[in-house]
Amino acid sequence: MCRKVHMKCRKCGQSYQIHEVADQLDAETEAVLERYVSIVYD
């Protein structure tokens, strides 16, 4: 679905749902995601 957020590893190309990598995000990525009102987890 278009509204699902996935993070894709630049090295291996593996795609992850946001909750799988939330504890590993850097400050820059967190700043981008903070612009969104909410993220809904499935």
Image (spheres, rainbow, N blue to C red):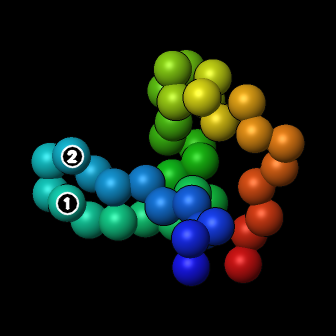
Look at 35% across and 66% down and name the residue there: 15
Res 27 → quadrant? top right
In the orientation shown, which residue stands out farthest toward the left? 11
Look at 73% across and 30% down and name the residue there: 35
State the image coordinates of residue 20 (x, y, percent, origin top left).
54, 62
Element marked by disc 2:
loop
Is 15 situated above or below 11?
below
In the displayed structure image, the side of residue 36 where residue 20 appears, left or right: left
Alpha-carbon distance for marks 2 and 1? 6 Å
- Report the quarter where the N terminus lies: bottom right
Type of residue at label 2? Arg
Type of residue at label 1? Gly
In the displayed structure image, the side of residue 17 where residue 37 appears, left or right: right
State the image coordinates of residue 7 (x, y, percent, origin top left).
43, 54
Is 6 situated above or below 21?
below
Q: Residues within 10 Å of mark 2 (few under 14, many from 20)?
A: few
Q: Which residue is mark 2?
A: 10
Element marked by disc 1:
loop
Label of residue 34 in the image: none
Question: Toward the viewer: 2 or 9?
Answer: 2
Look at 49% across and 40% down and name the residue there: 24
Look at 72% across and 78% down and name the residue there: 42
In the orientation shown, which residue stands out farthest toward the front? 2
Q: Residues within 10 Å of mark 1 (few under 14, many from 20)?
A: few
State the image coordinates of residue 11 (x, y, percent, origin top left).
14, 48
Q: Is residue 20 visible?
A: no
Question: Toward the viewer: 37 or 20?
Answer: 37
Marks 2,1: beta carbons within 8 A: yes
Label of residue 13 in the image: 1
